[in-house]
Image: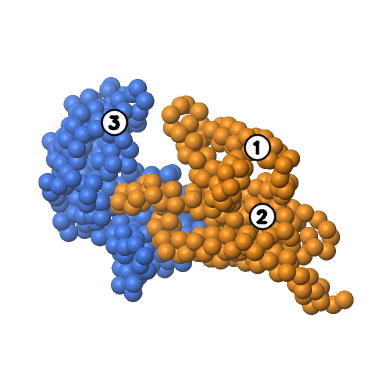
Chain colours: A blue, B orange
Amino acid sequence: MLSVENLSVRYRQNLALEQSSLKVQPQRIVGIIGPNGAGKSTFIKAVLDLISHTGTVTYNDRPLKGQMKRVAYVPQRTAVDWDYPATVEDVVMMGRCIHIGWLRWASAQDRAIVRESLARVGMESFAERQIGELSGGQQQRVFIARALAQKADLLFFDEPFVGVDQTSEAIIFQIFEELRNENKTLMVVNHDLGEAVSHYDDILLLKNRIIAFGPRETVFNDQNLALAYGGKLSRFVDSDGSTVVLS
Amino acid sequence: MNLVQLLVDPLQYGFMQRALISALLVGTICAITGSYLIVRRLSMLGDAVSRAVMPGLAIAFLLGANIFFGAFIAGVVATGLIGAIHTNSKIKEDTAMGIVFSSFFSFGIILITKIQKDNKIDLNHFLFGNILGVSESDLITTLVISVIVIATICLIYKELLFHSFDPLGAKSVGLPVQALNLIVMSLIAATIVASMQSVGVILVIALMLGPGSTAFLLTKKLKTMMLLSVAVGAVSSTVGLYLSYYLDISSGPAVVMVSTVFFILSFLFSPRQGLLTHFLHNGQDEASVSGSLAEEVYKQ
């Protein structure tokens, strides 16, 4: 179980995230939603100790800081330099880096894990491509493969669906569900309130503090959304019965 | 005189043999650490550090200590100061670099011009290099630094790759990113120090960036970028050295101009990115576009 207590983040004078506490059960896909500037990415980065913060984060009752091997983080696509001289295989092999350990080289087993991970996201035939030569969806799948290669138990994704095509989105959601069923915990930042929401087991609704957290059915309602988004949100049912939300 | 004689004749002199070995070593390590500067977008920091080493070597000379060690310390201190200024104020990193390197550089020049009056030490040699004056002990220093730089990079290559590609990702799995940063900065400072004698502090940045960016345009893996960069760096250094010998020109600028020629060729003719490559292929592209248009029309 991932347990977050009193997490706060300040950027200069501004409070980006205030006194946030929650407990995430294993085997859940948690969607982190909220308006722009609500602190969604900040929340993930603070949990992973990538930015300075106050509060504590534990995983299975021990500080998460000492168990980073079990954590995979997929950054926002815009945070990556796609001109970097690395192939698809290089990037996925980074997921093995911490397992291989210092002063050692990748073994045949590591290479096999990289191949398997690539196959799972349908990217095995792109292994030798430079990462900048891929489409947005393919790039995201490569990063998911890196998280798979890492064999992490806790996976964090920052806006994985931005600039991603339909095929890739479907593949990614399918992998999320498989991972959940393998007893892993996933936390996914997503600003999209449309159909995507139905894939999450739990919803964490943020607006610089936790507005609501819990199972999707109980949290994802007009009242909570109005609290997070103010009056700028309208929700209506489409002709095919799905819910459409405009903010 | 044939080509072989042209190449071999100068090597009958001890100073030319030392110069050649020094040029090859410097070309190699500049190419390797320069590749990190390029992929991490730290080129300006490399430039700043290269000038900031001046006061360190002057102070070390005054104290009778190893001038290479003094220069290295000054380079590392300057890097630390740049970081301290921009994290503790609203001054951005580029401005912090400008302030620190120009102050260090000025202080270094004042010290060296003072020392110059009483000692046999020449400011110009540090600024622009004097590869033909490489002594045996200079060569040993360069060799030791080169071995340390190359060995370090071989040993922690995969961690440096991860960290330079995705610093946040590397930190999230628990890699010691601060330590990796410090190691890279130290390797860069060490490379600059080892290169002072042959290319000088003003131009060392060119030898770090020229071969690296030539290779960057031609490769898709960091490892091959580094290897190709080493080849370009070593050839540039050697050719530059011979030009310097035969044309009686300063060694540093000669080496840099050769590496610039390589960069221009790569910029124009790189198969995937070259400016002229696109230009030459455009004719064919247009043909294929009209071809596919014809196909569309045919389908309808």
Same chain shared by disc 1 and disc 2: yes
Q: Which residue is mark 2?
A: B197
Q: Are marks 1 and 3 in contact (CB under 8 Å)?
A: no
Residue at image location 43% in from the left, 29% down from the top: B88
Q: Is residue B296 visible?
A: no
On screen, residue A181 versus residue B52, left or right, reads left
Q: What chain letter is assigned to the residue under label 1?
A: B
Q: CA–CA distance between discs 1 and 2?
A: 18 Å
Residue at position x 57%, y 44% from top? B63
**Amino acid carrying mark 2 in the image:** Gln
* Number of the label disc, if any, that sits on residue B102: none
**Chain letter behind tag 2:** B
Above or below: residue A211 compared with residue A169: above
- Local packing at callout 3 (Cα closer than 10 Å; few below 14, some 14-19, many 20+) is many
Quick one: label 1, few (<14), some, or many (20+) residues within 10 Å?
some
| Residue with the mark numbered 3 | A9
Question: Is B193 above or below relative to B229?
Answer: above
Q: Find disc 1 in the rendering and name its residue.
A: B111
x%, y% of residue B194? 59, 56
Q: What is the three-letter code of the residue carrying label 3?
A: Val
Residue A157 in view in this figure: yes
Q: Which residue occupies 67% across, 35% down?
A: B110
